Amino acid sequence: MTVPALLSAPLASPVAASYARLAEVFSGLRIEETAPGERLPEGAGWFGAAELAAGGERLDAFLAWDDAQVLRDYGQRGRPDVVATFGLHRYGWPACLLVTVPWFLHRRVPRLPAGAVAFQRVQGRLAVRIEEFACLPGDPAAALPGARVVDGEEALRAEVRASLAEHFEALLEGFGPRMRRGRRALWGMVTDEIVESLWYVGALLGEEERAVAELELLMPGSAGRAGRPAGLPERRPEKPYAGGAGFRPLPGAGAPDGTARPTRDRAACCLFYTLRPEDTCLTCPRTCDEERVRRLAATA
């Protein structure tokens, strides 16, 4: 893939154009950048990712929102591990986009340690401080401070995986003990957040087919109950991730252009079934293909 041509004006940020494009198609999330050396927002509902990674009272306060939401919406309290799982999902899904959207749109991969991200969940806002990023040869952003040029697409995919692994390794230190899951299950959940967030945004951008293809290369591994797609070389999941993108065509579900719709089976369970056993997620392994087709048809 060639690096997109950019305007001749000086680049203020390697990811600003990517985040602006995301805001155009997904109004439920706003991303703000702070300059290197500046503090991230605090107070007024903001939680630093490093605070969540540390556990303790700040993570308690963060998860109190999920606990109250479950009680309000479902009339029952969720188990502590369910509440912690919901909390990680609601942070992880948008946080993954901080890395994957710039990679998908402009082939730039920011490095985001936990101390460089803050989240305001009620308002759907993320704040980031980017001091280092990877890009391809020939990218105009290579002249910016903090740029690191890597040799080719696979090297850049490795940067995506490494950036997200660094970020979530820290987050799982805080969330993991509360979720009562083993390491493989925790990283399976992270795998699902990476894949399903970019898959969703790719569809909003009108590039679902490319998003699926890119994610298969980014996150290799098993393809759930149906095995890997025909023609795709077998590769084990990249450590520490568990499972892979694992897309497969959904029989009987046609897109507007007549092609088969993609689906996948989650690598980890979101535990929503503990609240509504009859209401499984669309990509839950418990949801049969016939039910997936029915739901897609109902929302077309």
Image (cartoon, helix red, strand yellow):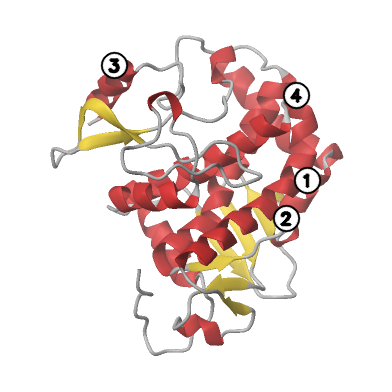
Quick one: SS at disc 3?
A: helix
Relative to 163, 300 lies left or right: left
Which label's residue is closer to the chain start, 3 or 1?
Answer: 1
Q: How far apart are marks 4 and 2 (CA)?
A: 22 Å
Which label's residue is closer to the chain start, 2 or 3?
Answer: 2
Q: Residue 114 carries which label?
A: 2
Residue pointed to by mark 4? 180
Work out whether residue 212 or residue 11 is closer to the camera in this orientation and state it: 212
Q: Where is residue 89 in the image (x, y as percent from the top left)?
A: 59, 36
Within-10-Å neighbours for mark 2: few <14, some 14–19, many 20+: many
Q: Do the residues bearing badges 4 and 2 touch, measured as CB atoms within 8 Å?
A: no
Q: Is the residue 156 above or below the residue 219 in the image? A: below
Relative to 265, 91 lies left or right: right
- Outermost residue on the top side: it is 278
Work out whether residue 226 or residue 98 is closer to the camera in this orientation and state it: 226
Q: Residue 290 carries which label?
A: 3
Camera-nearest label, 4 or 2: 4
Residue pointed to by mark 1? 53
Q: How far apart are marks 2 and 3 (CA)?
A: 41 Å
Query: Residue at (46%, 58%) from the top-left corner?
Result: 101
Query: Residue at (42%, 58%) from the top-left corner?
Result: 22
Q: Is the residue 190 above or below the residue 137 in the image? A: above
- Outermost residue on the right side: it is 56
Which quadrant: the N terminus? bottom left
Q: Distance between the residues labelled 4 and 3?
A: 32 Å
Within-10-Å neighbours for mark 4: few <14, some 14–19, many 20+: some
Q: Distance between the residues labelled 2 and 1?
A: 8 Å
Which label's residue is closer to the chain start, 4 or 2?
Answer: 2
Within-10-Å neighbours for mark 1: few <14, some 14–19, many 20+: many
Which label's residue is closer to the chain start, 4 or 1?
Answer: 1
